[in-house]
Amino acid sequence: MIKKISYLFLIIVLLSACTATKKTISDKTEANPLQWKSELKTLALSATINADYHGQSNSARIKMTIAGTDSITMTVIGPFGITLGKLYARPDYFVFYNMFNDEVIEGIASAKNLKEAAMIPLSFEQIVHLLRSESPQKPELYVKSIQTSEGTFKYENTSNNESNDYVFLNGNNQICRYLNNMKDGKTSMELLYADYENYSGFYLAKSLSFSFPEINGKLTIDVSDFQVNKNINQQFSFKIPDKIKRIKLD
């Protein structure tokens, strides 16, 4: 049943915010460039997406709004302005209305559920931080290891039982690469950032490229517009039609 979930769910879940960096490191004498951005209260964006997932290539537009790191609403728009899907999510719950397949997927936004539904080995909350160009887990868990041959600085987090996190910063202390590797060394997810611009004091990446080697999947996001710390007047949740097919993840 889960295999029937379209690539749209992967897109919706991943596109739940977008970029910014810095935080404190275990060495108290040095500021940690992975610091989470508490000043980034709201973030809205418009973007185009291209996905090559399970042998299918698709493109669409998205409009997304995120309040802090707590709740998200998003709409995926296809050809001729047709709405293909909607998402409402918070750390303990998500609901995705796939209008194309006329079904709803809902459950706890845990790493287990997102991996089962969309091959993403991270919780929804971790994904939100990652897409804001923040470390997906608490910054103090990361240790600066080496400067790579490309001139980037590598930070690693080996505290997880199932996987290791690696964050790479460029010379401007902006995240340029993220890796999630399983303990056997296989890469489950890679994210490349590019085209940073300054929006109201926050440097945000306008280009994000995901790859998922385990499933031979790729997703690119090209942001056309960011709106930072604007008042939110919209309702995040949405009504689900009666008698629609519902897929519930425990």
Image (tube, rainbow, N blue to C red):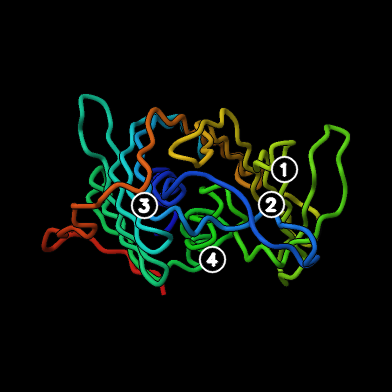
Foreground label between 4 and 3: 3
Residue 20: percent from left, percent from top: 54, 46
Measured Cα–Cα span from mark 1 to mark 2: 8 Å
**Label pair 1/2, CB-CB below 8 angstroms:** yes
**Residue drawn 79% across the image and 38% down it:** 152
What mark, if any, has residue 42 been given in the picture?
A: 3
Of all residues shown, which one is farthest toward the top? Answer: 80
User: Which amino acid type is shown beneath numbered disc 3?
Assistant: Thr
Residue 137: percent from left, percent from top: 62, 63
Residue 53: percent from left, percent from top: 50, 38
Q: Looking at the rendering, which quadrant does residue 34 occupy?
A: bottom right
Would you place residue 193 above or below residue 85 in this image? above
Closer to the camera in the image, 246 or 207:
207
Would you place residue 216 above or below residue 139 in this image? above
**Residue drawn 74% across the image and 36% down it:** 171
Q: Secondary structure at mark 4?
A: helix
Q: Secondary structure at mark 3?
A: strand
Q: Which residue is mark 4?
A: 111
Residue 88: percent from left, percent from top: 30, 58
Measured Cα–Cα span from mark 1 to mark 4: 25 Å
User: Would residue 79 appear left or right of 144 to someone viewing this image?
Assistant: left
Q: Which residue is mark 2?
A: 33
User: Which amino acid type is shown beneath numbered disc 1?
Assistant: Leu
Measured Cα–Cα span from mark 4 to mark 2: 25 Å
Q: Earlier in the sequence, mark 1 or mark 3?
A: 3
Would you place residue 185 above or below residue 62 in this image? below
Q: Which residue is mark 1?
A: 169
